[in-house]
Amino acid sequence: MQHPSAEPVLFEATTTPPPGLSPRGLRILAGGVVLASMVIGCLFAWLGAWPILGFTGAEAALVLGLLALHRRWSRRTSETLTLAGGMLTIRRTDWRGRRESVALDPYWTRLLLEERPGRVSALLLRHHRATVEIGTSLGEEQKRDLAEALDDALRRYRSPVFDNPQLRED
């Protein structure tokens, strides 16, 4: 159970890998793999190389099994960024379910979007000498959106606007 924090959450974002194929698309792909395997197996059986049937069946099962494992593992993977309580916290869960947490002082943390020619940019958080890459499962556009939102939140944290009722003009 989480206890309510004295300070409000200034920023929170959760990133997950793209879902990939829909269940319908996955069924179509599985049907295509099985059909291709059957066609190749039947062709080789017709040519007299019937032992190939077992190999094509095993190959199709391996492809479909790896596809299902990848889909299951990618559902577990997530990364949550939270700016609250004077800390920028990065909580990660990998495909095995292992959790990792990194806490940085948001006042000293700098955000950097590093361009990499021919590849998706890297979104980095620099704190003193430590560098943490975030949003590794995101595409280029999503990284830019996350960078913009997080940079805005960090800027608001570093330069708060205080509302003093005594200084208001009536």
Image (cartoon, rainbow, N blue to C red):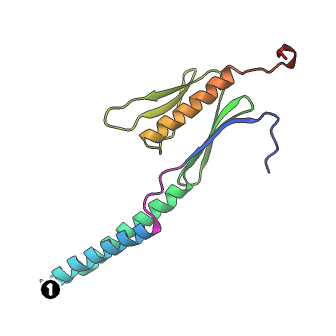
When the figure is inspected, residue 166 is found, relative to residue 67, above or below; the finding is: above
Mark 1 = which residue? 46
Indicate the quadrant where residue 70 lies.
Answer: bottom left
Disc 1: CA contacts within 10 A as few (<14), some (14-19) or many (>=20): few
Q: Position of residue 45 (x, y in %)?
A: 18, 84
Indicate the quadrant where residue 50 lies.
Answer: bottom left
Is residue 99 toward the left or the right of residue 143 in the image? right
Q: Residue at x 35, y 75 (%)?
A: 31
Is residue 71 toward the left or the right of residue 40 in the image? right
Is residue 35 toward the left or the right of residue 122 in the image? left
When the figure is inspected, residue 72 is found, relative to residue 146, above or below; the finding is: below
Indicate the quadrant where residue 56 lies.
Answer: bottom left
Q: Residue at x 72, y 28 (%)?
A: 86
Q: Nearer the viewer, residue 81 or 65?
A: 81
When the figure is inspected, residue 73 is found, relative to residue 131, above or below; the finding is: below
SS label for mark 1: helix
Q: Nearer the viewer, residue 114 or 52?
A: 114
The magenta segment is 16-23
Furthest residue toward right: 166
Which amino acid, mark 1?
Trp
The answer to whether residue 55 is seen in the rendering is no
Instruction: Determine the main secondary structure of the stretch shown in magenta.
Output: loop
Q: Residue at x 67, y 21 (%)?
A: 158
Q: Residue at x 41, y 64 (%)?
A: 67
